[in-house]
Image (spheres, rainbow, N blue to C red):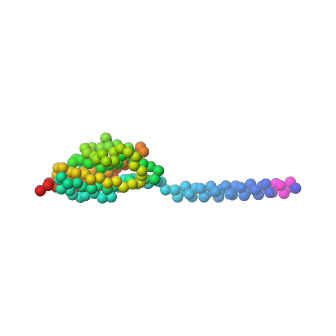
Amino acid sequence: MNKKLFFSLFLGIIIFCLLVGYNYLLAQKKIKETKPAPLGIYLQSYPEEVVSGQTGTFIWNVDSSPDLSTPQTTIYWSYNASPSALTKKDSPQAVGYEFHQDDYSQGKYQLPDTFDLNINFDKPGMVYFRAYAKVGDNHLWTDEKSIKIYRKL
């Protein structure tokens, strides 16, 4: 009787270990397949040129998981370029853009979402701009783009 009991116990331990090992391998496979939540900002459209005194429309998208929001997103712009690469730690105060719009500067905007602004450019020249959003501790920036502002005839 002791041999039967010992054999049953031994077989039970082997089956238990195999099941634990199988479950571990499945969990590791699922972990490898896990994708990080998206977090980024993308310009969808903007004017290539505008006549001074008229508005240009800017549309951008902030991509993230649905549980996030932003307290601030806008277009920062200037007549002087600030072409350096920006990281998620670079706040707007660290960048040399003189102007921004206040439309989405305070609040809680659920993400992901698409935003748009109309900006009136009152003097001719080259305008450099980036879309910006603050998400959690991250400062998200697009690459710098430019548009030509022509003199009003």
Along the line of sight, which residue is nearer the eye, 137 or 122? 122
Residue 3 located within the stretch drawn in magenta = yes
**Number of numbered discs present?**
0
Left or right of 80 on screen, residue 109? right
Whether residue 132 appears in magenta in the rendering, the answer is: no
Q: Main secondary structure of the magenta part?
A: helix
For the point 44% across and 49% down, which residue is it?
68
In the rendered structure, which segment of residues is drawn in magenta? Answer: 2-7
Between 80 and 67, the one lying in front of the other is 67
Q: Is residue 137 left or right of residue 124?
A: right
Residue drawn 57% across the image and 58% down it = 29
Q: Quadrant of residue 30?
A: bottom right
Q: Is residue 100 visible?
A: yes
Outermost residue, left side: 153
In the rendered view of the protein, which quadrant contains the C terminus?
A: bottom left
Q: Is residue 14 above or below residue 76?
A: below
Residue 107, image x, y percentages: 38, 45
Q: Looking at the picture, how far across and down is residue 28, in whole percent?
A: 58, 55
> Along the line of sight, which residue is nearer the eye, 82 or 129?
129
| Residue 83: percent from left, percent from top | 28, 49
Query: Residue 33: image x %, image y %?
Result: 52, 58
- Say which of 45 and 88 sits in front: 45
Query: In this image, 121 relative to 85: left or right?
Result: left
- Image quarter (top left, top right, bottom left or bottom right) of the N terminus: bottom right
Compared across the picture, whether 27 is left or right of 113 comes to right
* Residue visible at 23% across and 58% down in the picture: 48
Q: Is residue 85 visible?
A: no
Residue sitting at x 76%, y 57%:
11
